[in-house]
Amino acid sequence: MVVEDYELLREGLVLMVERAGDFRVVAQAGSAEEALELLDEARPDMLLLDLVLPQMSGTELCRRVLERHPQVQVVLLTGKEELASILEAVQAGACAYLPKEVGPRELVESLRRVRKEGTLLEPFLGRRLLEAITQGSKTSPDDFGSLMAPNAPPAGTAVLSTREVQVLRGIMEGGSNREVADRLSISEFTVANHLKNIFRKLGVHDRTRAVLIAMSRGLLAGLGLLVGAGWMA
């Protein structure tokens, strides 16, 4: 389902998605209210929606959709927003956040990765999170853990191995399991196993929260040297 209040943009998104050949748009809506009305009948696997909607925010729509259909994968598409808005949307259950500047090919590839891997952490978001923690932001770095993963272990109790840190660095840079595997010269299956161990240690269930927790707890030491300079610096 595509939810966007600007009709021209909505029609463009529908066209881009359906041209890919492996997605079918089962419904489209111009408002959150319309989306909720169509939800039970359309039963989408994925929701592509604008974070800023009239009357009701995309974050609130995400929360209501997942209360009724928790299996839906929610992908937010929006312009420049405050970091707090991004965190709130992810907390509501969104599994990916894409900038509106994304091109047609990148949009489709991102949706495919979400379908395959469950979540997607875009490189630009990883950089903004790092800047917020290292330079300060309206959202306190200490709040990332409690905000994003209430079941996370206390600071100092979770220890990641060297390889787990390398895998998480790759994920933070926006790499897929395959890309991280190729960069580290290991199998995609091994990356998936490392991620399972990371999730277990950090008390989370997806990549975004794992990166947030690890960054806020100082488990990715020296990460600032890696951003924009490669994963294995």
Image (cartoon, rainbow, N blue to C red):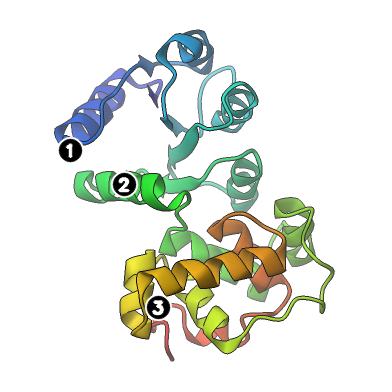
Q: Which residue is mark 2?
A: 112
Q: Can residue 222 be spotted in the picture?
A: yes
Q: Which residue is mark 1?
A: 20
Q: Tell me the distance, in whole angstroms, between the alpha carbons under discs 2 and 3.
A: 24 Å
Residue at position x 57%, y 55% from top?
206
Residue 224 horizontal/vertical position (percent): 54, 82
Q: Are marks 1 and 2 in contact (CB under 8 Å)?
A: yes
Tell me the mark number nearer the camera, choosing from 2 and 3: 2
Residue at position x 33%, y 81% from top?
183
Residue 39 horizontal/vertical position (percent): 48, 15
Mark 2, secondary structure of its residue: helix
Mark 3 or mark 1, which is nearer the start of the sequence?
1
Residue 199's place in the image compared with 65, above or below, is: below
Q: Which residue is mark 3?
A: 228
Q: Is residue 172 left or right of residue 181?
A: right
Mark 1, secondary structure of its residue: loop
Quarter-of-image position of residue 201: bottom right
Q: Residues within 10 Å of mark 3 (few under 14, many from 20)?
A: few
Mark 2 or mark 1, which is nearer the start of the sequence?
1
